[in-house]
Image: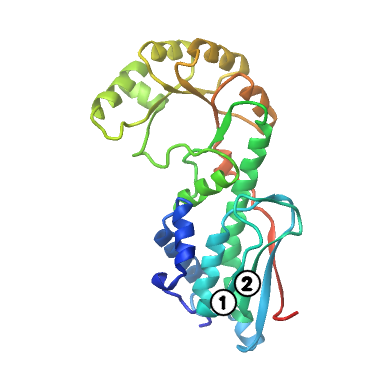
Amino acid sequence: MDIAATAFDEMPTALIAELEGAGLDADDVYAQVVRALAEDVPTEDVTSVPTIPASDRGVADFVTREPGTVAGLAIAELVFRYVLGAAVRVERPVADGEAVAARTTVLTVYGATRSLLIAERTALNFLCHLSGVATGTARWVAALEGTSARVRDTRKTIPGWRRMEKYAVRCGGGVNHRESLSDQALIKDNHVLAAGGVVAAYRAVQQRYADAQPPLPIQVEVDSLDQLRELLEIGVDSILLDNMTPDQLAQAVRLSDGRATLEASGGLTLESAAAVAATGVDFIAVGALTHSAKVYDIGMDLRPDGA
């Protein structure tokens, strides 16, 4: 096996601190990297081992093929450090969240050629997907420029990737909504149906967690202006406006008059983003930031060490 299998506690402290500082659980990221590599290399790389001498050393340049926004560089570095161990050298000419042009080198790794090729796909899977999320988010941010609205993500994420994807949204300039069903209540149509109305549903959650510290954030979804009026009358301060037209959204903003934070959701596109934001809503919820992210095109260009 050409994998050093570097232990978590042998990773550079600065790298672990960087992951934690980004809002990620470094131990969990490490475990995901280990699982991904075990999936990709259950025994050995049967192509690289016979074709590349163990003594060969190379340099891997990770180069963008299109303009975009980068995210996940520290995770890609962790992949290489796990595979190559202490012998690896990693350079990062750019930082996560940075907008880059095509043909930009975002990461350079020095080490044994076999091991570089073993780590290549796993590193790219993390880096390209997360950069895709960041790049797509940045496009929404650009579409909202000149308005006060912010684009916000949802829980529509790849299982096990939520923290990483939400980090990538932040890299693209977006805002995170709740991370789980436990850190914020979001009362949707099925909850309203089960409880017997928007007010009843809100009261039920409010009473259940009245003593929570810190206070539990509660957001309620509405699909009509009548429901909005009901909630404003009882002081609800966070409301999700589902599948409303720009005219209805503008009416909702006037009705609220600053009493509640308003978020537009449902069927939104980049083409309609500016018109929706112009209504005065505070947030635009976009599940596509994560569930439909286009992979960002980055390739690994290998060259001999010293070339």
- What's the mark number on residue 232? none
- The amino acid on which the numbered mark 2 sits, given as a three-letter code, is Val
Q: Position of residue 209 (x, y in %)?
A: 26, 30
Q: Could you tell me which residue is drawn at 36 percent across and 38 percent down? A: 183
- The amino acid on which the numbered mark 1 sits, given as a three-letter code, is Val
Q: Which residue occupies the foreground of this view, 37 or 302? A: 302
Q: Secondary structure at mark 2?
A: strand
Q: Could you tell me which residue is drawn at 56 percent across and 56 percent down? A: 72
Instruction: For marks 1 and 2, give the CA distance.
Output: 7 Å
Q: Could you tell me which residue is drawn at 52 percent across and 75 percent down? A: 83
Residue 22 visible at all:
yes
Residue 265 visible at all:
no
Please tell me in which quadrant of the rendered image residue 275 appears. Answer: top right
Q: Position of residue 194 (x, y in %)?
A: 32, 24
Q: Position of residue 254 (x, y in %)?
A: 54, 11
Disc 1 to disc 2: CB gap under 8 Å: yes
Q: Secondary structure at mark 1?
A: loop
Q: Where is 191 relative to 12, above or below?
A: above
Q: Position of residue 65 (x, y in %)?
A: 74, 57
Please tell me in which quadrant of the rendered image residue 93 appears. Answer: bottom right
In this rendering, would 233 be left or right of 246?
Answer: left
In this rendering, would 66 be left or right of 77?
Answer: right
Provide the residue designation for mark 2: 109
Q: How are the colours assigned in the image? A: rainbow
Q: Which residue occupies the foreground of this view, 112 or 114? A: 112
Q: Could you tell me which residue is drawn at 43 percent across and 38 percent down? A: 178
Provide the residue designation for mark 1: 88
Residue that protrudes farthest toward the front in the picture: 14
